[in-house]
Structure formats: C-alpha cells, structure tokens
Amino acid sequence: MKPWVLLLVLLLSLVFCLGAPATVFSENFVPVWGTDGYHLANQGTQVSLTMDRNSGAGFISKMIYGSGLFHMRIKIPAGYTAGVVTAFYLTTEPEYGDHDEVDFEFLGNVNGKPVALQTNIFLNGQGYREQKFYLWFDPSAAVHDYKILWNQHQLVMLVDETPIRVLKNVAGHMPGYLFPTRPMKIRASIWDGSGWATDNGKIKVDWNRAPFSSTFQRFNVDACPVTRSGAPCGSPNMWWNKFQNLTPIQKAAYKNVKRKYMTYNYCDDKGRSNLHLLGECTYN
C-alpha cells in the first residue's frame, strides 16, 4: 500500500475518534495504586493523578494488548515541579525484572527551566535507551496528544502526530536484535523521581509545593486485546498493522525533531556502558 494511502487511513481514523463520544475511564482502565490521588472529572472522561507527601498514583488498562495505536491526552503539573515524574507507557506483566517497556516520561524542573520529555525502551529488562527532548510547546499549559504505534514492523512514538522516536523491527537482518513482541498493558502514573529526574537527582521534590497533579484524557483504545482465543494481533486486517514505515512527510518531521529538539540520545553517548546496544542505532 502506498505511503499516502496509509497516511489517509491514519488521518481518517483520527477524525473518527475525535467525532466519537468520549470514552469513560472505567470502560478500559482501573486505578492500580495511590487511589487517594485518583480523581475523576467530566463524567468520567478525565482523570487527575495527584502526588503528595504520602504517595503518587497510577492506573492500568484492564486488557493486555499485542499491537495497536495507543493514545493519551496529557497535561502535566505547572510551575516548580523538580523531581516530579509523569509517565504514560506500555509494559509487559510483571512490570519489573525481565520485562519489555515503552515509556513517555516528563521530568519536572525548577521555575524558569523547561520540562524534559524522556523516552526509554526496555527489552528483556535492559533499558539505557534514553532519548530526551525539550518540546516545541509547554506541556503544562494544555493537554496534548501522545501516541505509541506498535506493530510487528515498527514502534513509533508521536507527539501531536509528529514522530519523535522510531524502533524498526530488523530482527531478521541483525543477529541478537531485540524488539518488543510480548503482550503489554497500558499504564500511566505520577511519582517521586527525586533520585534522578532533575539535574541527575541533585534537585529533589519540594513537598511544600505539593500536591502536584497531572491530567489524562482519551481512554478509548485502538488495539488488539490478547485473549484466550488467540486472535492474531499481527493481522493485516487491523489498520494499525499496515504502517510498515514512516511516510516521506513523517520522515522529514522526524529528522527535524531530532535536529532541533533532542537534547540527549543514548546512541551518541560513548561514555556509558551500553556499547552493545549501538548496533540498533544504525537502523533507527
């Protein structure tokens, strides 16, 4: 299928989603920890997660998925947010140990300095694949779209329809190449990252400024749930599986984001002990 046709399919799906009634949180998600910091609004179509001295908070999808386009509209806390981490991510179960994970993480900062968006990918429990960006807008000023396209061909992370990260599945061309293939759940959270999030952990959460609150919207899920029936989540009949490559327009936007807004890339960090990962950088 031609790239422009695939782009049209994606745009039409987005128009349909925008025109459809808003999905309530409880249809696809449940609180998973810090329930005192979990607050529904707008008839259940919006959730605020709040962190104070006692706890952060998080929620998780009811289902586990094998492919899809995963959306979330997010607005992070404004002002002095050093040490505060807001996250939207996919992860295998259990969440720790030998797991796969795909992260959007907003790393709070002091007044007057921008919040970094960090992306990371864990494969078989191995991370150290961080990429950081200062976005072209203030993510605390309004809600914005954050998406993860995940199929058997590629994993693409997008901000307001702009790709900011790509991991191609080239396992057939590179021995030992890792790509997430195990089913994953959707998670979101706000938590205390004082140990590392701001200036490498030198600046901690100022609890005198608590509580900190992040807003999440858009709880419909365009994905393939993994069920006992064993539905093939790699089927070409699922529209998100048709996207094997970025379109030319997306490639240009991706190149521009990396050039103008990326502030750290693990592929360029020769001082870290991740040299065994760098082969994957040639494909992405």
Image (tube, helix red, strand yellow):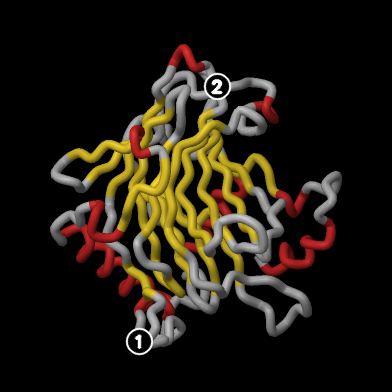
Left or right side of 50 for 169: right
Up-down relation of residue 234 to residue 251 (above or below): below
Task: Kindly report the distance in space between the C-alpha atoms of the residues bearing marks 2 and 1.
Answer: 47 Å
Going by the numbered disc 2, the residue's amino acid type is Val
Between 172 and 60, which is closer to the camera in this rendering? 60
Locate residue 71, reporting x and y percent.
Answer: 36, 57
Up-down relation of residue 60 to residue 83 (above or below): below
Q: Name the residue located 36 percent from the left edge and 36 percent from the top edge.
A: 49
Locate residue 127, reporting x and y percent.
Answer: 69, 55
Residue 187: image tag: none
Q: Quadrant of the C terminus?
A: bottom right
Up-down relation of residue 117 to residue 8 (above or below): above
Which residue matches tag 2?
Answer: 205
Visible in this render: residue 136? Answer: no
Q: Name the residue located 83 percent from the left edge and 62 percent from the top edge.
A: 276
Give yes or no for contact between labels 2 and 1 (Cβ–Cβ under 8 Å).
no
Local crowd size for mark 2, using a 10 Å CA cut-off: few (<14), some (14–19), many (≥20)? many
Going by the numbered disc 1, the residue's amino acid type is Asn
Which residue matches tag 1?
Answer: 237
- Residue reaching furthest top? 208
Left or right side of 54 for 256: right
Helix, strand or loop at label 1? It is loop
